[in-house]
Image (spheres, rainbow, N blue to C red):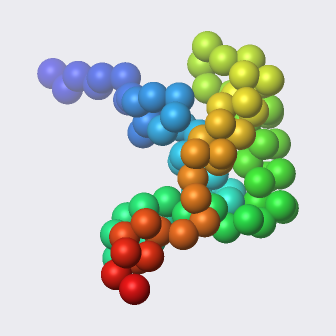
Amino acid sequence: MLMFRERRPSYRTIEGWARSVLLEAGAILECEEHGWMQDRADPHARERALDVARLDPPPGLSPEQAAAEIGAVLGSIGDTCPECLSQN
């Protein structure tokens, strides 16, 4: 008999969820060489990410908490890759 398990979300933490929302919105990007996340400083992409957080927060978070988590993760990401800087 074929059994189906409930599919887990692609993220395991709230921070992972916030990173995936920011990536999908285009607010951050990944350094192709080293994998570090970089802030694109795009205000429209940031607003899209915040809209997604408010309209579809992860289970257990209010829309305000989800938006705050997006802001916290975005605040922890720089605009340059630290490894690219050290190579110059």
Q: In the image, residue 51 lies at what x, y percent?
A: 81, 42
Q: Quadrant of the C terminus?
A: bottom left
Question: Camera-side residue: 15 or 80?
Answer: 80
Q: In the image, residue 3 lies at what x, y percent?
A: 23, 22
- Residue 27, quarter of picture: bottom right
Question: Camera-side residue: 19 or 38?
Answer: 38
Q: Is residue 63 above or below residue 39?
A: above
Residue for point 58% across, 59% down: 78
Residue for point 42% across, 39% down: 10
Q: Is residue 60 above or below residue 29?
A: above
On screen, residue 22 versus residue 5, left or right, reads right
Q: Quadrant of the N terminus?
A: top left
For residue 32, say whether it is visible. Answer: no
Q: Is residue 33 above or below residue 36?
A: below
Q: Is residue 82 above or below residue 52?
A: below
- Residue 34, quarter of picture: bottom left
Q: In the image, residue 35 lies at what x, y percent?
A: 37, 64
For residue 67, say whether it is visible. Answer: yes
On screen, residue 60 versus residue 42, left or right, reads left
Residue for point 71% across, 39% down: 71
Q: As drawn, which residue projects farthest toward the top?
A: 60
Q: In the image, residue 75 lies at what x, y percent?
A: 65, 45
Question: Camera-side residue: 85 or 26?
Answer: 85
Question: Camera-side residue: 71 or 6?
Answer: 71
Q: As drawn, which residue projects farthest toward the bottom?
A: 88
